[in-house]
């Protein structure tokens, strides 16, 4: 295990980390991709060959030619809409903002049931709180949508578990920009440092954490192979640790408690 500063605060990503909303998310993305031209976004798609992997290049080309996600992407359930927009639009912040707004409108037609990404997520969060760890949420979801999901997940809701919640429409720039992390730090009245962690399942979460000066923990719930992870992370924005499941995350965050148990 890497040597990490013990966390006093942990921010979590939502979709693909704590919660599984893949089905509704992919339906919403497929609703908005055919209207990229009407949104003025078709001409702002990245040029071919700029992806960090052949898979990213193939996704971009498929969307450019057919206006839908590849079936393999939806079948594998590994990549989030935020990462999809990064692949499609790269550093074009305005294009990504328009895409997120269009996604939110489409997501209204599909969102509903929300399940924990792994069994025992709530119990894990409770153990972190009992150990004195402050917790926050950083999600690119629009607040109205996220609040609904947070109150429904697990059949009982997890609203009481988080000391701060920052949503995509609370800031001008969504992840991978550091704005959401900075907003969360401000809400909690703390400074960035190695004892503040951000746990997320995408490169955008890792980049946001590193840009904000906090510890980046990559949650590999999608079970990507090590060789693939090496390729997808920008060289200057690699995670400080990788957790393949929440048991591994607990071991990183609460090593003494895990050993004594």
Image (tube, rainbow, N blue to C red):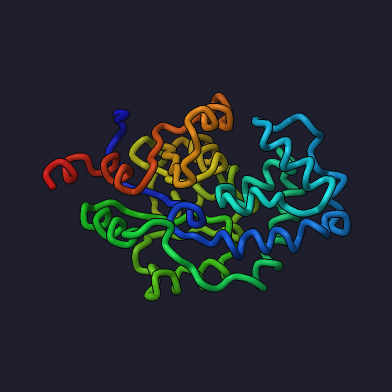
Tell me where residue 37 sits by quadrant: bottom right
Task: Quadrant for the N terminus, please.
Answer: top left
Q: Residue at x 39, y 34 (%)?
A: 241
Position above or below: 204 against 148: above
Which residue is situated farthest in the left direction here? 260
Q: Position of residue 122 (x, y in %)?
A: 32, 62
Left or right, 53 with reference to 242: right
Q: Position of residue 231 (x, y in %)?
A: 57, 28
Q: Position of residue 14 (x, y in %)?
A: 48, 56
Q: Nearer the viewer, residue 26 or 218?
A: 26
The total number of labels drawn is 0
Position above or below: 14 against 227: below
Position above or below: 27 against 185: below
Q: Nearer the viewer, residue 106 or 180?
A: 106
Q: Nearer the viewer, residue 34 or 173?
A: 34
Left or right, 78 with reference to 99: left
Left or right, 209 with reference to 171: left
Q: Residue at x 79, y 40 (%)?
A: 61
Q: Position of residue 94 (x, y in %)?
A: 75, 48
Q: Residue at x 38, y 40 (%)?
A: 243
């Amino acid at each position: 295990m890497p040597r990490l500063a013990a966390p006093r605060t942990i921010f979590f990503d939502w979709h693909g980390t704590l919660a599984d909303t893949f089905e509704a998310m992919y339906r919403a993305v497929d609703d908005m991709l055919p209207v990229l031209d009407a949104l003025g976004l078709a001409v702002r798609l990245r040029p071919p060959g700029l992806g960090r992997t052949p898979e990213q290049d193939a996704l971009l080309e498929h969307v450019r030619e057919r206006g839908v996600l590849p079936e393999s992407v939806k079948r594998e359930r590994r990549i989030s809409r935020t990462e999809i927009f990064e692949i499609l639009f790269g550093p074009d912040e305005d294009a990504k903002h328009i895409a997120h707004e269009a996604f939110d409108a489409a997501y209204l037609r599909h969102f509903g049931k929300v399940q924990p990404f792994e069994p025992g997520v709530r119990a894990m969060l409770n153990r972190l709180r009992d150990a004195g760890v402050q917790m926050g949420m950083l999600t690119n979801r629009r607040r109205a949508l996220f609040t609904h999901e947070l109150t429904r997940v697990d059949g009982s809701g997890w609203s009481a578990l988080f000391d701060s919640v920052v949503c995509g429409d609370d800031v001008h720039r969504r992840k991978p920009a550091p704005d959401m992390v900075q907003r969360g730090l401000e809400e909690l009245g703390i400074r960035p440092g190695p004892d503040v962690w951000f746990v997320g399942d995408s490169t955008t979460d890792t980049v946001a954490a590193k840009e904000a000066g906090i510890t980046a923990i990559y949650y590999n719930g999608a079970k990507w192979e090590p060789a693939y992870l090496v390729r997808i992370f920008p060289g200057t924005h690699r995670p400080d640790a990788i957790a393949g499941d929440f048991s591994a995350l607990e071991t990183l965050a609460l090593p003494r408690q895990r050993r004594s148990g």
